[in-house]
Image (spheres, rainbow, N blue to C red):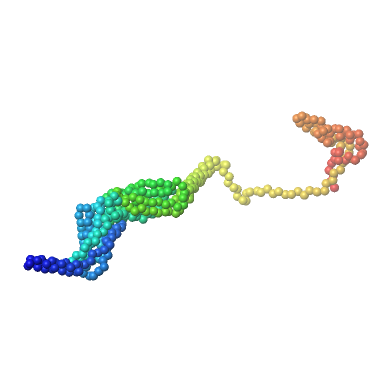
């Protein structure tokens, strides 16, 4: 009988103790979430009673170990607690502690940086901002190397691999690589025709750790146009060369011309050198006009003997001149004062003066 009483009292004490502990234990956290971005991983949770004496015990568990840390905040950056991010997957548990009493655990979803890992949350890095510009008739693509930009993120911790990425356009998809030593990654894309708007999409990653795609468009003209200076500089060069050569030729010609003049003067004998006479010894010829009578009267010759003599003299002159001509013809056709005309004059009356201008005449001064 006594044994039964002892058992009943013990059960009652234990029940009261457990009931009192249940009443005094802090409530567990709720809704534990994982926020992973380009610069780290953060665990967040909710708690109804945010009194000053409540602490939260945060524990990160992965395939081959676990790490924990305590905080009074409702969030904690767990980037430094992640080991082997290239292949591991993780989950986070959070519990509240107050006065030595601990609440129940609240667990998060499983997350990983490995695209092939069996996890609910995939933590991918964003592709860096991309700059597009025309260069040499192509579209030039440039961005900061993620290995330098996200150096402190757990996803790339201790990573020495190169970045493999792709640039996809409406025409093609091209692959490129960017070494860790390169702070800036650059590449160029060629288009078959002018579009006005050129759009590209960049994808890639580090083996099993992909980057979120990045799309961007460039509006403008990427074609090459020959600069005016391409033609200006050669033309200026040729012009300056010609001017320089012309100046040299002119200087040489001037020098040779002066030497030729000196040699020519010394080559002439002294008696050929003209020396002007003094002004007093130089006699200048003067041209004087002769006054003549402008009134001249022409009259026929009245002396028949004189007329006959003149005709005979004229006939002799005409005959001698006719003998010198090549292919000379009839003198009657060559001279108005030929023999035929004179014969006609002989038949006329010598005293008839109607043919005065057809007969020899002399000048008579008034």
- Is 253 or 202 nearer to us in this picture? 202
- 303 vs 14, left or right, is right
Q: Nearer the viewer, residue 307 or 161?
A: 161
Residue 44, can we see it?
no
- Horizontal side of 16 relative to 107 (left or right) equals left
Q: Is residue 364 above or below residue 1?
A: above
Is 237 situated left or right of 49 in this image? right
In x, y percent, where is residue 176?
Answer: 35, 47
Which residue is at the front of the view, 115 or 262? 115
Q: Tell me the residue at 76%/31% (across/down).
A: 325
Q: Which of 341 and 155 is in front in this view?
A: 155
In the figure, residue 144 lies in which quadrant?
bottom left
- Residue drawn at the location 77% of the way across and 49% of the way down: 291
**Quadrant of the image for the N terminus?**
bottom left
Q: Tell me if residue 262 comes above or below residue 7 in the rendering.
A: above
Residue at figure coordinates x 22%, y 56% from the top left:
61
In the image, residue 366 lies at what x, y percent?
85, 47
Q: What is the tally of numbered marks visible in this picture?
A: 0
Query: Residue 16 at what x, y percent from top left?
Result: 15, 69
**Residue most toward the front?**
1
Res 11 seen here:
yes
Residue found at the far left of this picture = 2
In percent of width and height, residue 161 lies at 28, 49
């Amino acid at each position: 009988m006594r044994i039964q009483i002892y058992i009943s009292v013990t059960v009652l004490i234990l029940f009261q103790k457990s009931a009192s502990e249940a009443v005094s234990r802090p409530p567990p956290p709720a809704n534990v979430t994982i926020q992973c971005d380009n610069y780290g991983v953060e665990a967040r949770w909710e708690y109804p009673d945010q009194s000053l004496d409540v602490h939260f015990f945060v524990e990160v568990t992965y395939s081959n170990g676990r790490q924990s840390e305590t905080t009074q905040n409702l969030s904690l950056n767990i980037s430094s607690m992640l080991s082997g991010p290239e292949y591991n997957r993780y989950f986070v548990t959070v519990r509240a502690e107050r006065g030595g009493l601990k609440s129940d655990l609240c667990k998060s979803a499983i997350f990983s940086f490995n695209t092939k890992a069996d996890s609910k949350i995939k933590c991918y890095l964003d592709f860096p901002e991309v700059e597009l510009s025309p260069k040499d008739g192509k579209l030039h693509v440039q961005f900061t190397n993620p290995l330098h930009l996200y150096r402190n993120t757990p996803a790339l911790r201790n990573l020495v691999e190169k970045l493999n990425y792709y640039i996809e356009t409406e025409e093609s998809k091209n692959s490129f690589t960017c070494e860790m030593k390169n702070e800036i990654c650059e590449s160029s894309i060629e288009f078959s025709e002018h579009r006005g708007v050129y759009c590209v999409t960049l994808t890639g990653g580090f083996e099993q750790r992909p980057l979120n795609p990045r799309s961007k468009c460039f509006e403008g003209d990427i074609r090459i146009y020959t600069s005016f200076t391409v033609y200006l500089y050669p033309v200026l060069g040729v012009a300056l060369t010609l001017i320089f050569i012309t100046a040299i030729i002119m200087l040489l010609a001037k020098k040779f011309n002066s030497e030729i003049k000196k040699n020519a003067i010394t080559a002439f004998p002294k008696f050929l050198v003209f020396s002007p006479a003094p002004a007093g010894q130089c006699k200048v010829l003067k041209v004087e006009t002769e006054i003549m009578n402008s009134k001249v009267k022409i009259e026929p010759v009245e002396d028949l003997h004189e007329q006959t003599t003149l005709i005979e003299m004229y006939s002799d002159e005409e005959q001698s001149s006719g003998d010198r001509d090549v292919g000379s013809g009839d003198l009657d056709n060559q001279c108005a004062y030929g023999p035929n005309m004179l014969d006609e004059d002989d038949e006329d009356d010598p005293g008839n003066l109607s043919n005065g201008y057809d007969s020899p005449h002399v000048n008579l001064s008034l």
